[in-house]
Image (cartoon, grey):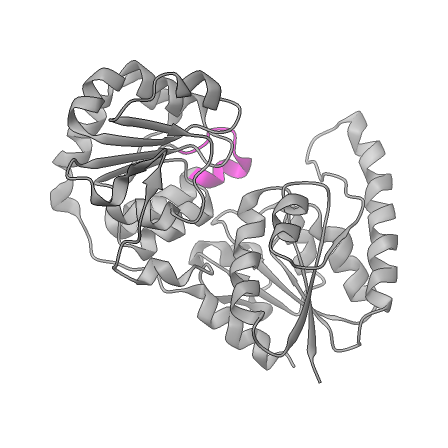
């Protein structure tokens, strides 16, 4: 008899990608897998992987006063009702696995009301409100960073690590073709800049300001984000490759690059830690609870990555940043983040 798992989580790629990593590891086994989400990025990514997707109403959870809170509380209520009837149609031993985001709260409440087993996973070192609420109903809580344990009930919380793709633990570099250029065979040092899937204006502008000098030293691959790609594509040449989005070749780019400059989402930090890749992090200043700064500091403490906050970053030249990066090479530490995927898959197996 097949075992039933319902995944939920969304609102950003940071919540969706760890779920997809687990689904990829489970889908060839004896499981029926479904996904519940809202109309965010998960509604595009999940169906594209041929995973059954069920959309519900969602409302954002805010910690501040807003008229929108009154509207969203009704959306949450509708989402709970929709998720409740969905759960009634699933076997009693169904496991609900949440990777967070405000879309997960109605699903978790509905799962609890219908007696389903509930696991949640927290990706960041600082915990979001959705997972804090969900933890009250969960049977088990898994965390990526030890620092997160202070936010959850001790008896049900354990350190699993972040679920990562197997490529993070393979030294070989696959073919990397960007804008028709074979980056994987480049004899010139590669610099990879990414502001995440949406891009980061502050990173983009800094690279553009220093593009002439940087192009002399590096082959630059720059994930600028969809909204900026037209603006930057006119600057493309054999030394500078601006793209809207980097897909599966991201891990290989991390491996190939001499320098990686990025935001500090939990997934990016975890992938670079798994590669023991010292890099340069520019944490998003407005991130909830300054979570990106704390994520980046995990990499700073473990492998000596350079962390530069936005205000300082704006006042530094790229030459000063690179001098600081290369000057800290003696602080390199050897550490590879264990793959949380293996632990989480074992916990899922034991749930049935």
Quadrant showing the N terminus: bottom right
Q: Residue 80: x percent and y percent? A: 83, 53
Which residue occupies 26% across, 59% down?
172
**Residue at horizontal 51 percent and vertical 31 percent from the top:** 198
Q: Eyeballing the image, is 303 above or below 121?
A: above
Where does residue 70 sit, x and y in percent of width and height? 84, 33
Q: Residue at x 17, y 48 (%)?
A: 332
Residue sitting at x 41%, y 46%: 268
Q: Quadrant of the C terminus?
A: bottom right
- Name the foreground residue: 184 vs 305: 184
The answer to whether residue 127 is visible is no
Q: Is residue 236 visible?
A: yes
- The quarter holding residue 239 reads top left
Q: Give the x, y percent position of residue 220.
A: 27, 30
Q: Residue furthest front?
A: 180
Q: Nearer the viewer, residue 312 or 26?
A: 26
Left or right of 342? Residue 10 is: right
| Towards the viewer: 333 or 99 | 99
Identify whether 166 is placed above or below 2: above
In this rendering, position of residue 253 left or right of residue 136? left
- The quadrant holding residue 102 is top right
Is 217 placed above or below 105 here?
A: above
Could you say where residue 156 lies in the image, as x and y percent from the top left?
Answer: 59, 69
Does the stretch in magenta take in 343?
no
| Residue, far bottom | 1
304 vs 203, left or right, is left
Q: In this picture, which residue range is highlighted in magenta?
A: 283-292
């Amino acid at each position: 008899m097949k075992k039933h798992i319902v995944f939920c989580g969304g609102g950003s790629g940071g919540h969706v990608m760890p779920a997809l990593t687990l689904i990829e590891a489970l889908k060839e086994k004896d499981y029926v897998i479904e996904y519940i989400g809202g109309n965010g990025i998960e509604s595009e990514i999940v169906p594209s992987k041929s995973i059954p997707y069920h959309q519900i109403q969602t409302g954002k959870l805010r910690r501040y006063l807003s008229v929108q809170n009154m509207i969203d509380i009704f959306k949450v209520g509708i989402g709970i009702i929709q998720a409740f009837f969905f759960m009634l149609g699933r076997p009693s031993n169904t496991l609900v696995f949440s990777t967070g985001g405000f879309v997960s709260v109605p699903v978790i409440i509905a799962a609890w009301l219908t007696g389903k087993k509930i696991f949640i996973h927290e990706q960041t070192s600082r915990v979001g409100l959705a997972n804090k609420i969900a933890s009250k109903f969960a049977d088990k809580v898994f965390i990526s960073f030890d620092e997160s344990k202070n936010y959850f009930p001790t008896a049900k919380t354990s350190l699993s690590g972040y679920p990562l793709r197997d490529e993070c633990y393979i030294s070989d570099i696959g073919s990397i073709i960007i804008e028709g250029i074979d980056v994987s065979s480049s004899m010139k040092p590669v610099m990879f800049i990414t502001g995440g899937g949406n891009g980061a204006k502050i990173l983009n502008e800094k690279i553009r300001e220093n593009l002439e000098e940087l192009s002399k030293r590096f082959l630059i691959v720059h994930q600028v984000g969809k909204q900026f790609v037209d603006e930057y594509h006119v600057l493309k040449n054999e030394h500078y490759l601006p793209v809207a989005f980097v897909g599966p070749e991201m891990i290989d780019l991390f491996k190939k690059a001499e320098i990686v400059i990025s935001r500090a989402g939990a997934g990016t930090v975890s992938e670079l830690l798994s590669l023991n890749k010292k890099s340069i992090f520019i944490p998003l200043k407005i991130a909830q609870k300054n979570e990106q700064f704390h994520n980046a500091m995990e990499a700073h403490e473990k492998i000596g990555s350079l962390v530069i906050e936005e205000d300082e970053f704006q006042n530094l030249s790229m030459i000063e940043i690179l001098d600081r990066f290369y000057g800290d090479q003696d602080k390199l530490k050897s550490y590879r983040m264990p793959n949380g995927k293996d632990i989480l898959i074992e916990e899922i197996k034991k749930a049935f």
